[in-house]
Image: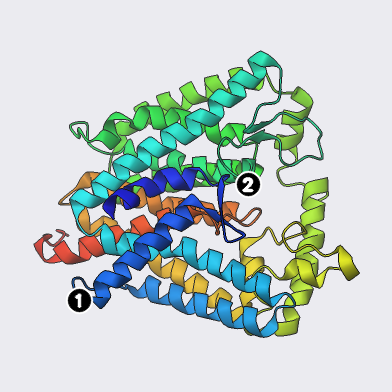
Amino acid sequence: MYILVYLIPFFAALNGIHLSIYGLNVRLDQFASTLVLLILFMKVALRSTKLYLDFPAKMLIIFLAISFTSSISNSPDRSYSLTQTANLASVSSLYIVLINLLDSKDRISRFLEYYVIAGILAIGFGILLYIFSLISGSQLYGVNLSEDLGNNAYGVYGTMREPNIYGSYSLVYFLLSTMMFYSRENDNSSMRKSNGFLFLISSIGVFLSFTRAVWLAAIIGFFMLSKYSKRYLSTPTRKAKIAGRVVLVAIIIIIMSNYVSDLFLTYKIGNIFNLEESTAAYRLVLWGAALENSQNHLLIGNGTYSFASFLSVGDSYNSQTNVWISNLFLGLLHDTGVLGLMVFVVFLISLYRSGISSSKKILYISRQNTTEILGFCTSLVCLMIAYIFTSGLSYGYTWIVFGMIGAYGRYVGEVETKIPERQS
């Protein structure tokens, strides 16, 4: 069972690949997580282990129940909405799996080692594809080099669904590796040894996704991490080395920018906040329609991924290819109503507060664990910023971030009695 758990980071990186099971498209991380969850439930039923559910996990279960209720009650395409609810349940089960099975420091550390390796391989593979595309002058799988200014899919996506997903995936590793610079010099963990390389390629990965929301989130996250380092770690001596690495990445990005159309790059940067730009304008129109449609069933919503069906005309409707709500929170409001949105926000806030609390409590036992927890907490916030524009809630890498915070919270809670009180 633990072999599957440790493979989940690799499966999450392959989110552009699906398995066909009884006519349904299932991603590898969904399949592995569901299988492990079933094994866990069997062990619970046989009383060989106990099921651990923290407060965020209970909020998640309530949220999924609301999603199921709205889909079966209000969706115009009940079958499709229930299928998407099942998909969301399967990928979000990663949270339950991780908080139950990563129940010790050794297991958390081992999972994190595999997590880092998976990130290096996935992001690095995308970068290599980009380089080979430039050299060969041809369009390779995993890269879209079309410079049509109206094409929002320009960029690297590697083994993932599309560039926005590749960008937010790289964002998590960028923030985690940045925070790890504040770990002690004598820390010889695998995470520590590979951190510099991870920082380098994740920075490039964020850039090559050409996703403006991810760029903005990365900047915000960098300042958040600087604030955390001063408040919780007091590490002013690390600033010079961080600045040096930032300069190195900036030089590499500038070099790589020479291989991107100046017009396109200027367009991307110059229109970050332009609401009249074609992509932004299109999103605003859809968001307006989604907000208006949300009023039909304001309390529990219209059903999971039901938006396209409300815009359909006659036989032109195709629930799997038509429009969807890119804004995570507006999508939750539309699909699960005010009640579902509130429950999910409570899930996020409680998880974030648990992570921050755990990072402070564990500091006197493991500085490395503190930096890791703060890195994942910052990733949570920054992913939510990026997901305002393109949601990745249905992808496993998002729930790994959530699950790691929860797993650390459980570990810290169980050793809390051994942690000395902080001196005032």
Q: Residue 225 lies in what quarter of the image?
A: top left
Asked whether the viewer can see residue 409, the reply is: no
Disc 2 residue type (three-letter) = Ala
Residue 175 percent location from the top left of the image: 43, 42
Dot 1 falls on a residue whose secondary structure is: loop
Image quarter where the C terminus lies is: bottom left
Cβ atoms at labels 2 and 1 below 8 Å apart: no
Q: Mark 2 points at which residue?
A: 213
Dot 2 falls on a residue whose secondary structure is: helix
Q: Is residue 138 above or below residue 348?
A: above
Q: Residue furthest right?
A: 314
Q: Is residue 14 left or right of residue 265?
A: left
Q: Which residue lies furthest to the front in this view?
A: 22
Q: How far apart are marks 2 and 1 (CA)?
A: 46 Å
Name the residue at 56% across, 49% down: 18
Residue 338 percent location from the top left of the image: 61, 79
Residue 377 percent location from the top left of the image: 40, 55
Q: Residue 327 lies in what quarter of the image?
A: bottom right
Q: Which mark is residue 119?
A: none
Q: In this view, does 397 lie above or below 219?
A: below
Q: Is residue 177 above or below residue 102?
A: above
Q: Mark 1 points at which residue?
A: 47
Camera-side residue: 334 or 281? 334
